[in-house]
Image (cartoon, rainbow, N blue to C red):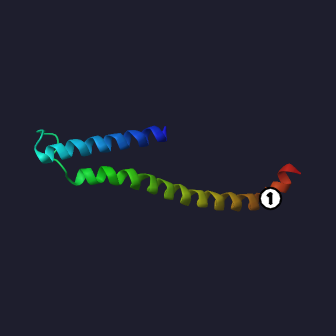
């Protein structure tokens, strides 16, 4: 599902870019968009920024979970050798 969301975001960003360019050139008129603006930059920034932020958060949470797991495994004596041997 994440890939579907990424592809949809890319399509919407490029679609919005085309509409914004056409409005900026005056080829079409729209009351919904002022043309090329800060929102266009944010749409493309989100395509790179959001996955980078979520991967960094996942990495940090993975480190925290590994530390907690090792802490409790040592505390209760649950090691790989004790469970499977």
Look at 36% across and 52% down and name the residue there.
46
From the viewer's side, name the closer residue of 50 and 15: 15
Secondary structure under the numbered disc 1 in the rendered image: loop
Q: In the picture, residue 41 is in which quadrant?
A: bottom left
Look at 77% across and 57% down and name the residue there.
76
From the viewer's side, name the closer residue of 42 and 24: 24
Please provide percent x and percent y for residue 66: 65, 59
Q: Which residue is mark 1?
A: 77
Please provide percent x and percent y for residue 58: 53, 55
Look at 47% across and 53% down and name the residue there.
54
Number of residues whose C-alpha sits closer than 10 Å to that of mark 1, classed few (under 14), some (14–19) or many (20 or more): few
**In the image, 76: left or right of 4?**
right
Please provide percent x and percent y for residue 50: 41, 52
Q: In the picture, residue 71 is in which quadrant?
A: bottom right
From the viewer's side, name the closer residue of 54 and 28: 28
From the viewer's side, name the closer residue of 34 and 56: 34
Please provide percent x and percent y for residue 39: 24, 51
């Amino acid at each position: 599902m994440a890939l579907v969301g990424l592809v949809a975001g890319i399509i919407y960003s490029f679609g919005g870019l085309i509409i914004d360019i056409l409005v900026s050139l005056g080829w079409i008129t729209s009351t919904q968009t002022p043309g090329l603006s800060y929102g266009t930059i944010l749409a493309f920034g989100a395509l790179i920024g959001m996955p980078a932020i979520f991967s960094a958060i996942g990495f940090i949470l993975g480190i925290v979970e590994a530390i907690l797991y090792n802490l409790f495994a040592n505390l209760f004596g649950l090691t790989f050798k004790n469970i499977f041997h």
